[in-house]
Amino acid sequence: PMFDTIALSGSNRINGLFPSEYDEDKIDRFLKSAYGDIERRSRLVVSIHVPPKGILDYVPHIKKNAGSESLLKFIIRRKPFLVLCGHIHEAFGFAPYRVEGSSLVRVDIRDSYTMGRDADVIIVNSGALAEKRFASIDIRDTGKTLSVSVSLKQFTRKSLLRLALESIGRNVR
């Protein structure tokens, strides 16, 4: 299957301590520019460090939602079927939504989603690698329908050791 992908790093301004924090206007310009460079603009996947405002973005120690308003508006306007984000480690999870007018409406969690029927967009925050978290995403394209399944997982010690050994070129059995 062919997917159009936008991938951006950095985040919105939260505390101003990091050089990769950007004002919302700049994030909006990045997203618009990247979207303008895509030829087909169908079956869009967005991979971005920061989550959208109000979705998988709550930071308990500062008691606020720290996601990007620009990303939320982009999702509503452009309807990517999958948004992969992180940044807010405490807010790991996934959330399926329907786009209704100028807002996102959460739909029930299920094993699989037929895109356009069960959900319009699935937003995934895989959590922190330091906490051994990751997301497994299965995308099936029948030509007529696109279905997506998401499961949140944790690495085991054995799987982390396997990854470490493979990264230095050692064969693992």
Image (spheres, helix red, strand yellow):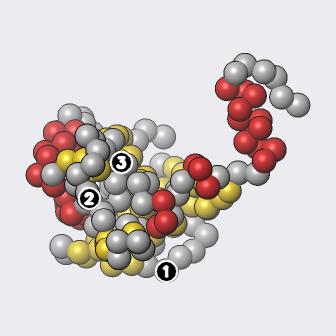
Q: Residues within 10 Å of mark 1 (few under 14, many from 20)?
A: few
Q: Residue at x 31, y 74 (%)?
A: 64
Under mark 1, the amino acid is Asp
Which circle marks residue 108 in the picture? 1
Give the labeled residue for mark 3.
48
Q: CA distance from mark 2 to mark 3?
A: 16 Å
Which image quadrant is residue 154 in?
A: bottom right
Q: Residue at x 24, y 35 (%)?
A: 39
Under mark 3, the amino acid is Ile
Residue placed furthest toward the right: 173
Between 7 and 53, the residue placed more toward the observer is: 53
Answer above or below: position of 83 versus 171: below
Which circle marks residue 14 in the picture? 2
Sequence-wise first label, 1 or 3: 3
Rendered location of residue 116, percent (x, y) = 38, 66
Rendered location of residue 125, percent (x, y) = 47, 59
Task: Choose mark 2 or mark 3, whichever is in front.
Answer: 2
Under mark 2, the amino acid is Ile
Q: Quadrant of the C terminus?
A: top right
Disc 2, disc 1: CB below 8 Å? no
Between 143 and 52, the residue placed more toward the observer is: 52
Which image quadrant is residue 101 in?
A: bottom left
Task: Locate residue 40 relative to residue 24 in the image: left or right.
Answer: right
Rendered location of residue 10, percent (x, y) = 30, 44
Residue 71 can be seen, yes or no = no
Q: Residue at x 72, y 27 (%)?
A: 166
